Amino acid sequence: MLDFKSILDALNAAQAVGEVQQTPQYPPDQERNLCAGTLLTLNSCCEPRSLSLGVGPQVAAGTLQSAWDISGTEELRTTIEMLLHEGQHLGMDPIVAEIHEIAKGGCGDNDLYQLLVEAFGDDDAAALRVAEMSLVGSVGQNDPPLANMRDIHCTISSLRAWDLERAAFNARMGFEAGYIDENEALAILQQSRELAESTYDSWRNYGIAFVLGRVIGYSSNCDFMIDELGEQLSMPISLYSIHPMGAPFTPSNKA
């Protein structure tokens, strides 16, 4: 699994010696593909409008090796292909979809919590409940507020975002390492974005699904991710706001 602490430590070290360069570089018709991987890029203290993470090939290659056992182009492609089309969400989604249907039927928060305990165990259920309570009130592009856990589970029926976000971030890291070129990396980000749009109807719902997948996958605290998601949904200049999910590119989508 991807060790985000090691990535963050490496990025902070690179920033400390002035090696990180983060310059927005794409016109709006290409920029919308950079929505894919935005949350993990921000989590690594980098600029999501830049394909490059700015840490240099040595740090990027070391991160891919330690986190994913990736040491070259073909291993990177295989891992990204797995995340795009298989991934960890396949084991989670039958349970998530069942809870989704139960929530739509009027199940209360306490009953939902018991379902999470039965499905994922005490620790993950407790972590999910904390994350979900932090997500209550989240709003996005024309999305209604989330009032409680039931609203969240009525909205989310798949955690595919957990895999798609990691595929996009690995593409950025692979480009930084020199394993793939710019065109291939951008094509992967476009594929990730298109798969996201075929699964979710807003970046808010995508972000929520990613957070829940991360909680289950790592049994970890996601407060920073939730804060970043809320900021990206509320800022009019964020990628999520400039390029709402499902909107065809037109001049009106420009920053």
Image: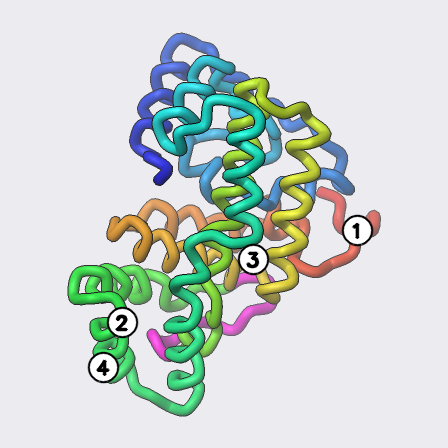
In the picture of the structure, the residue carrying the numbered disc 4 is 110
Q: Residues within 10 Å of mark 3 (few under 14, many from 20)?
A: many
Secondary structure predominantly adopted by residues drawn in magenta? loop
Which residue type does callout 1 highlight?
Phe
Q: Which of marks 1 and 2 is in front?
A: 2
The residue most toward the top is 17
Indicate the position of residue 56 as horizontal and vertical percent values: 50, 15
Q: Residue 235 carries which label?
A: none
Give the number of marks.
4
Mark 3 highlights which residue? Answer: 203
Q: Quadrant of residue 69?
A: top left
Q: Mark 2 points at which residue?
A: 119
Position above or below: 204 against 115: above
Q: Kindly identify which residue carries mark 1.
A: 249
> In the rendering, at what x and y percent does residue 172 appear?
56, 31
Q: How far apart are marks 2 and 3 (CA)?
A: 26 Å
Please say whether residue 152 is visible from this viewpoint: no
Q: How crowded is mark 1: few (under 14 residues within 10 Å), some or many (20 or more)?
A: some
Q: Is mark 3 on a helix, strand or loop?
A: helix
Query: Spatial distance from mark 2 to mark 4, Cα to Cα?
Result: 14 Å
Nearer the observer: mark 2 or 4; the answer is: 2
Where, quadrant-wise, is the C terminus in this rendering?
top right
Q: Give the range drawn in magenta.
A: 140-150
**Dot 3 amino acid type:** Trp
Give the distance between the C-alpha atoms of the residues marked 1 and 2, in whole angstroms: 41 Å
> Does 88 appear above or below 102?
above
The three-letter code of the residue at mark 4 reads: Asn
Name the residue located 40 percent from the left edge and 74 percent from the top edge: 153
Q: Which residue lies furthest to the bottom in this view?
A: 105
Whichever of callouts 2 and 3 sits on the residue coming sooner in the sequence is 2
Q: Which of marks 4 and 1 is nearer the N terminus?
A: 4
Taking the spot 25% from the left edge, 66% from the top edge, the residue there is 120
